[in-house]
Amino acid sequence: MSASYGSTPARPLRPRRTCHSVPGSSEKFLAKAPTLAADQVFLDLEDSVARSEKEAARARVIEALRTLEFPAGKTVVYRVNGTDTPFFYRDLIDVVEQAGDRIHAVMLPKVQTPGDIELTDKLLTQIELAKGFEVGRIGIEAQIEDAKGLVNVEAITTASQRMETIIFGPGDYSAAIGIPITQIGGAPEGYPGDHLNYLYSRLVVAARAAGIQAIDGPYAAFKDEDGLRERTKLVRALGLDGKWTIHPAQIDVVNEIFTPTREQWEKAEGMLAAYHQATEVEGAGAAIFDGEMIDEANRKMAERIAGQGRAAGYAA
């Protein structure tokens, strides 16, 4: 793990039920970004920007970050081009030097090794020191998009104290692995289950071991709400923390699925209250709630759901 800025406390788990992609080449979409209901918006310099527009998009992103007012509580990120491109170093240096105080994290695509993260970490530290920014404040989000990245995912998640999320990139991954599909985020025919269960589970385990979040990539068929719901429910059930959206119409659907219902939240809060009464007041090792024996493992599960409900604005 990089120790370029010494020991730091655990990074904040920012809201990321929905992570909305905003093309950096579009002034219209950039201007709209602060108004979106997504927990996170990321201003993109990579796949959504044509090669001939890279420099112009970089300037637009800097201008947007400097001039737009993002609501408190919204996570603001931008995506650079990969470390194997001629655009990466200028994407990182120019944007962070000029607008580093306006972002929470940098998203790094096509991560294959811990070295990609370590390089980004060290450059960020140099920029922060040179500009007088708080050292270590800017986080890193890493996309896993091919076999090499997946093989190294555990080392990638712990390569820097800046790491905040690990993200699945379904389009590039499907192409790299050879999955016979052309729809990003969809499922191929011919497999009697979900073809990505292993990948999702591995990403979640790696993320949890490192104390960071796991995020699913986009569902490109933005008019197919049923398909989006199906895929989002699947990754939610497997423990992921959020999902990308690429069209504003997808945001409410994904937010809904990644938010516990009020009934689920109330049950979780009730379990916590019963467990506290039994263990802290009565000195018991377990409690009974709604006809079910609950112990420390139940408390941990309930605390996670209760926390998500509180973050969504539920109040007793």
Image (spheres, rainbow, N blue to C red):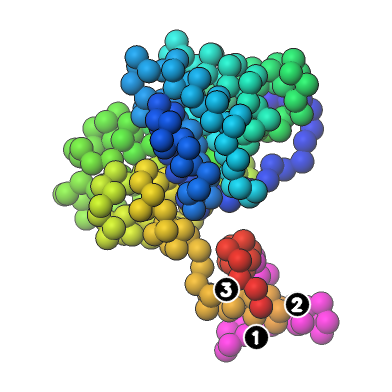
Q: What is the C-alpha distance between the residues marked 2 and 3?
A: 17 Å
User: Is 264 included in the stretch rendered in magenta?
Assistant: no
Q: State the SS at label 3.
A: helix
Q: For mark 1, what is the residue?
A: 288
Q: CA distance from mark 2 to mark 1?
A: 11 Å
User: Which label was assigned to residue 271?
Assistant: none
Q: Residues within 10 Å of mark 2 (few under 14, many from 20)?
A: some
Residue 225 image position (x, y, % from top left): 29, 58
Between marks 2 and 1 in the image, the one whose residue lies nearer the viewer: 2
Mark found first going from the N terminus, 2 or 3: 3
Height in image: 3 above or below 14?
A: above
Question: Which contiguous range is marked in magenta?
Answer: 276-303
Q: CA distance from mark 3 to mark 1?
A: 18 Å
- What residue is shown at x 58% (from left), y 84% (from top)? 292
Above or below, 80 against 209 in this view is above
Residue lying farthest left?
A: 190
Q: Determine which of the numbered discs, if any, sits on residue 276 in the image.
A: 2
Helix, strand or loop at label 2? It is helix
In this view, the residue in front, 183 or 36, is 36
- Category of crowding for the residue at label 1, using alpha-carbon neighbours closer than 10 angstroms: few (below 14), some (14–19), many (at least 20): few
State the SS at label 1: strand
Q: Amino acid at mark 3?
A: Trp
The picture places residue 273, in percent across and down from the top left corner, at 71, 79
| Between 45 and 81, the one nearer to me in the picture | 45
Q: Label 3 belongs to which residue?
A: 265
Whether pointer 2 and pointer 3 mark residues with C-beta atoms closer than 8 Å, the reply is no
Which residue type does callout 2 highlight? His
Asked if residue 110 shows in the view, the reply is no
